[in-house]
Image (cartoon, rainbow, N blue to C red):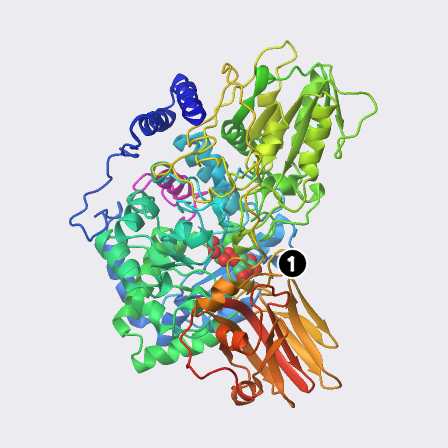
Amino acid sequence: MRIMKRITRLAIVRIRHFDYLSLLAATALAGCANSGVIPAVHPVAPLATIPNANSWPAVKSPLGLDPAQEARIGAIIARMSLEEKVGQIIQPDIASITPDEVRRYKFGSILAGGNSSPGGKENAAPIEWLKLADAYWNASRAADWSGEPIPLMWGIDAVHGHANIVGATIFPQNIGLGATRNPELIRRIGEVTAREMVVTGFDWDFSPTLAVVRDDRWGRAYEGFSEDPGIVRSYAGEMVEGLQGRAHGADFMGAGRVIATAKHFVGDGGTAQGKDQGDNPSSFEQIRDIHGAGYPPAIAAGVQAIMASFSSVRGIKVHGDRALLTTALKEDMGFDGLVVGDWNAHGQVPGCNNTSCPESINAGLDMFMAPDTWKGLYDNTLAQARSGQIAQTRLDDAVRRILRVKMRAGLFEKGAPSTRPLAGNLALLGAPQHRAVAHQAVRESLVLLKNQRQLLPLDPRANIMVAGDGANNIGRQSGGWTISWQGSGFANSDFPGATTIYAGIRKSVEAAGGKSTLSVDGSYSKKPDVAIVVFGEEPYAEFVGDRATLEYSPGDKKDLDLLRRLKAAGVPTVAVFLSGRPMWVNPEINASDAFVAAFLPGSEGGAIADVILRDAQGAVRNDFRGKLSFSWPRRGDQTSLNFGELPYDPLFPMGYGLSFGDQTDLPQLAEDRPPPVAGGADGLYFARGATPAGWQWQFDGGRIVALDRRAQEDARRFTWPGTKVARASIVAENPIDISREATGELSLLVDYRVDAKPTAATSLIIGSVALPIGGVLRSAKIGEWQTLTLPLRCFVRAGLDPAKVSVPAAVETSGRLTLSISDVRIASAIVDQNACGKP
Ligand code: BGC
Ligand code: BGC
């Protein structure tokens, strides 16, 4: 009953906001309170007709095929050698290819991955990027082309501004932009991003991400605008047009424009348990109408590239899925641009590896992203094109699409990157007019969740303490994909021109004649009138950000302690929470008087002061405008809480966001912690280079080194010296219970590669039970990755107590052995009934 009352109250508050989405949410909630039924969520008119139940909307590129252009492309293709065609469809990364190799192989495109930069220097000067762009472009130009030279196309992830480059304007991550509900602003952000990219010589942006995020444990939740397909749909075309210009407009692909990429097609935001690169089990209709919602408007706006997703849909890797890459995209939706792969993602298609995957091209991929694997992939793809394993017509179609995009982008005429309009105009990077757009984006993205007794806006003439380790930290307020892939480990000095949240507060307070002090740990000698505590998640990107729980910082409660200390001392406190997703923060909310969800605002942290502080005369400067584009959980187990799905019992529904006039005081929230997630609860003991929190690899007497298999440092190589018995083990902090798994016919799976065969008996161990694997390792092919599968029942039969396991997996031998391991997991697998190891 109390819950119902609260829901109704929230609903009323929201209606007062007169915000369309809030109204919808409110209606839904009222409906839910009265009848248990949530009405249809997104009455957005469909963009195009859906011809039949099994097809995607019929869209069509607004550009259409230009007969003269197509004829010119045909003439170029007719003179291309097979080698040149294969070169067009492979995209190496600058960290793994030299300009001279680009010249020799005549590649059509290169990329700069999140960790790649000129000379390997992450904070290289902007001008170095432009010089490098010219170096590659000139090399490609100098190649010995059979016919007309084909210009090179350079791509990068400018996913929240051109944030890889020092000094660029860094916009809020997409989750914050979702809260602005301002499509026009999205367009301007695209324009600014494109201009800054052109300054440093880029042609192509791997943005926008159109993921519709349905499980907030996903490490890329912040890259998505919303859990709501309607919001994603309303932004997709705007960002595309901001980057590329308006199709048919005079500015289309003109000065200061770049090629956009809608990604990751499709279903990336809906993988089970929010596992990055995982499997999306949704039905066809859900994939099309929820996860695919952004693609029709992106195509209708003329997006020239679409990136295939790492993930699978109903068990099929998208990189090998013809029904998605060809039928849905190219046939149903009429997409006539190019489909680019993701980072070695083709290697995950069954039957493929990083250096061989005709399946992907045959399924409809037009360009492999083969950062460090281009050489082997080039040789194999060439052989497959010769043998007919890749049909000539398919190869020609891929090349045609790539050349079409290049022609539409004007690359055949544009000349060397440094000679183009705006190139080298370094003053444009982080220019005041660009930062102003980011500043507005930050102001509009802030969502006010709690404002007890209308504490906000604050009087800047007060004595204000600013605390928390996010207060003066540009890296923290920017998140992943900032200067580097993970965005961690940078100093404020790496962000010239950027403003920390504290610096913005100080400026406003000083201007008003007040006093502000930065005290990260919250200590003070003279009690402040009010405290602003800025805290939140550390930066992360992709799978590194996958979490098992939405509880904020389960292992370290220092921020909560700080808030509670201030509360106990009677200091009114404003919490500013930096995060890439909604999180369970009930205790932190209880311990604060006002709570602001600031997401990951980027370089213009100063904009926060412009909202939470009054001006020197005491007048409100900017009210809160942000509305949640994600539902905020009431409990830690609400990991995939989405508006439009039942049961819907959020703490704050999608669309929620207070403004100063609201007199809603939030009651005390329940603080029961979500059930702890056991280490390895998801069955993953070692994956993507990491063990579960609190677990670790131990190897007394042997040597472990990090190794790259599918991604950077995602594997380990173990060397046994052969001088004594040595054991490489994964050790769990607290014993785990795998009885359910053991009775469920599951197995321990180890993905391994033998680099040097064992010279003595070797065993695989769980707990204290060892099963022989020497025979398996000795017959394994050296240097080849494979999977070892041992049913858990074998261990139980040999005496394992599955209820209390502190060593979930170990390998032991007294001999010499070099073994690489990339994955250790519990899963179901088909196994020979008699297979309990081989001595
Ligand atoms: C990511 C993509 C990105 C690409 C290039 C991949 O790992 O999934 O979003 O565009 O790398 O950096
Ligand atoms: C790249 C990213 C890529 C990741 C995947 C990084 O080095 O910069 O773009 O997504 O590796 O392994």
Residue 242 shown in magenta: yes
Q: What stretch is highlighted in magenta?
A: 235-262
Residue 179 shown in magenta: no
Residue 258, relative to residue 759: is it above or below?
above
Quarter holding the C terminus?
bottom right
User: Dot 1 corresponds to which residue?
Assistant: 734
Ligand 2 is in which quadrant of the figure?
A: bottom right
Residue 417, relative to residue 176: is it above or below?
below
In this view, the residue in front, 484 or 111, is 484
Residue 105, relative to residue 207: is it above or below?
below
Q: Which amino acid does label 1 sit on?
A: Asn
Near mark 1 (Cα within 10 A), the count class, few <14, some 14-19 or many ≥20, is some
x and y percent of residue 458 in the render? Answer: 63, 17
What residue is drawn where x is 29% and y is 32%? 37
x and y percent of residue 681 in the render? Answer: 53, 57
- Which residue in the rendered view is the most extreme toward the right? 525
In this view, the residue in front, 258 or 231, is 231
Left or right: residue 667 versus residue 314 is right
